[in-house]
Amino acid sequence: MSVVPQPGRRNLITDVDGLKVGSAQDALVRSGVTVLCAEQPMRAAAHVMGGAPGTRETELLAPDRLVQEVDALVLSGGSAFGLDAASGVMDGLRQLGRGFQIGGHRVPIVPAAILFDLANGGAKDWKRNPYAALGRAALDAATPDFALGSAGAGYGATTARLKGGLGSASWVLESGVTVGALVAVNPVGCVTMGQGPEFWAAPFEHGAEFGGLGMGRAVAQPLTKLSRTATTLAIVATDATLDQSQLTRMAVAAHDGIARAIVPSHTLFDGDIVFAVSSGDRAATEHGTMLEIGHAAAVCLSRAIARAVYLAEPMPDDHVPSWRSMYHRQP
């Protein structure tokens, strides 16, 4: 008899052993940064399907590149300004003695991706880019337990008609392999169906992790979010031992999770990217295991997207309502 996968103890990406996540945000700027890291370097890959990506050091994650591991991954608001968050993370990691050793020096490897939240009403007229400091603060705050909803890179995020946010979810497979997802949700598209509270990700919900509302009516609706103000940034992770080629396929498979939870997704105005991380030592050489891991990554990502919107908190002067303020549901 097959065993239905269950979330890990936290139902967070940090159910994958060794991973930590930290977030930092600035309420005045209405933006923030989220960092994923571990005690040891992580094998990583990435795949972009959005038409407007903003990234740093993602090219080195291809299977044929010299560097095979990263020290941290950064998700940030702030559009191109947010790429500077990785500089703050690099500074912190360097002080910890982390990094790729070359020429007698250690260079922390910190790929990053950003979303556009400059038009959300926050004070963006800074004289000094705040993102390096936010990145360092997020690194310093990294723990296995972390907040979802209006936090970190999802603090100022929005969707077509509701607030976005930071989400996460996990699955433990019958084999014992754990898969998790982390996402900052800020798309052109909608995460809920029509004008109702039901989530596109409802078929994949575990229990009532985002309300237990079931399926609504799939009604086409006009998109009101401004063009060039979008992107969904995601990380999927596993404790299975995967190389960069396998991780690339995991990232590709995980993009299905975005398409199932956000309508439309991967548009010309979204910078949708999925990073994939392997941090463990469980063998996963069989094709069947890889199939299960890719499917689990997509399902976890769909659930994480819905959780991000479901848990976002209302704030004064929001440009769009939160799911909670719109539908008056309690956690």
Image (cartoon, rainbow, N blue to C red):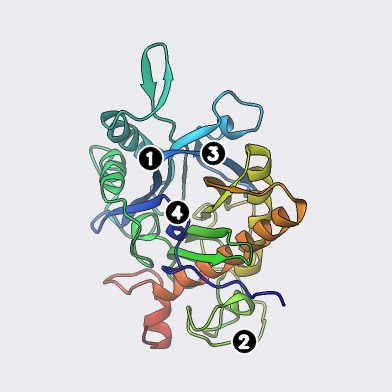
Q: Secondary structure at mark 4?
A: loop
Question: How many residues crowd around disc 2 within 10 Å: few (fewer than 14), some, or many (20 or more)?
Answer: some
Judge whether 321 appears above or below 149 on screen: below
Q: Which residue is mark 4?
A: 17
Q: Secondary structure at mark 1?
A: helix
Check residue 294 in the rendering and tell me which mark sits there, or answer none.
none
Q: Disc 4 and disc 3: Cα gap in Å? A: 14 Å
Tell me residue 212's x, y (percent).
52, 86
Q: In the image, which is nearer the foreground, mark 2 or mark 3?
A: 3
- Label 3 close to label 1 by CB (< 8 Å): no
Instruction: Say whether disc 3 or disc 1 marks the residue closer to the N-terminus.
Output: 3
Q: Disc 3 and disc 1: Cα gap in Å? A: 26 Å
Instruction: Inspect the image, locate mark 2, and give the three-letter code of the amino acid beneath it.
Output: Gly
Q: Disc 2 and disc 4: Cα gap in Å? A: 36 Å
Can you name the residue that lies furthest to the front here? 1
Judge whether 311 appears above or below 328 on screen: above
Q: Secondary structure at mark 3?
A: strand
Q: Disc 1 and disc 4: Cα gap in Å? A: 32 Å
Judge whether 240 appears above or below 109 on screen: below
Instruction: Inspect the image, locate mark 3, and give the three-letter code of the amino acid beneath it.
Output: Arg
Q: In the image, which is nearer the foreground, mark 3 or mark 1?
A: 3
- Label 1 close to label 4 by CB (< 8 Å): no
Instruction: Say whether disc 2 or disc 3 marks the residue closer to the N-terminus.
Output: 3
Q: Which residue is mark 2?
A: 216
Can you name the residue that lies furthest to the top here? 103
Tell me residue 65's x, y (percent).
61, 26
Judge whether 52 appears above or below 182 on screen: above
Instruction: Say whether disc 1 or disc 4 marks the residue closer to the N-terminus.
Output: 4
Q: Which residue is mark 3?
A: 43
Q: In the image, which is nearer the foreground, mark 1 or mark 4?
A: 4
